[in-house]
Image (tube, rainbow, N blue to C red):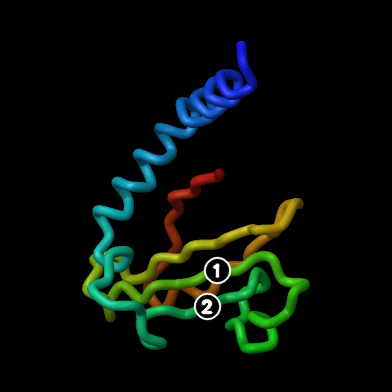
Amino acid sequence: MSTRSRIGLITLGIATKATPLCVGIIAFRKARTALRPANFYSCIQLTWWTPTGTISDTNYFNSAKNHSIAHQFDGNVVGDSYSSIDVAYNGWSGNVNFTLPSPGNGTKWGSREQHL
């Protein structure tokens, strides 16, 4: 078997395992108006958060030490039936704990965790 064939088999194995996750992510995106904007988000539609639950600022964005970030879509502003959608990204090699911002008065967080 050539190197090219082995790489193809490895790739196929990874793709097969990832298929249910990918299908779920695509379905979730299709169902959420907030994740399919006609134009790029404005500052009233999207808020960026640090893993500690504070709003990201220029210093956080520009620091090479930071490898994780979250963003929150305001569903009410973008016409989604969910009042808020939060997405957290961990680009670090280790685990990162994220502190969620307040969900707002009279609401609570639900969960649709997906681990890649």
The reply to whether dot 2 and dot 1 touch (C-beta < 8 Å) is: yes
Which image quarter is the N terminus in?
top right
Work out how far the residue at label 2 is from the one at label 1, CA to CA, in angstroms.
Answer: 6 Å
Secondary structure of the residue carrying tag 2 is: strand
Checking the image for residue 70, the label placed there is 1
Residue closest to the eye, 49 or 116: 116
Note whether 19 is above or below 10 in the view shown.
below
Is 28 placed left or right of 48 in the picture? left
x then y, percent, for residue 39: 27, 77
Checking the image for residue 48, the label placed there is 2
Residue found 63% across the figure and 58% down from its top: 90
Note whether 88 is above or below 55 in the view shown.
above
Checking the image for residue 98, the label placed there is none
- How many tags in the picture? 2
Q: Residue furthest top?
A: 1
Note whether 6 is above or below 98 in the view shown.
above
Residue found 33% across the figure and 47% down from its top: 26
Residue found 57% across the figure and 76% down from its top: 49
Q: Quadrant of residue 75?
A: bottom left
Is 24 placed left or right of 11 in the picture? left
Q: Amino acid at mark 1?
A: Ala
Residue closest to the eye, 19 or 75: 19
x then y, percent, for residue 100: 56, 68
Q: Residues within 10 Å of mark 1 (few under 14, many from 20)?
A: many
Residue found 35% across the figure and 39% down from its top: 23
Residue closest to the eye, 7 or 113: 7
- First in sequence, mark 2 or 1: give its number: 2
Secondary structure of the residue carrying tag 1 is: strand
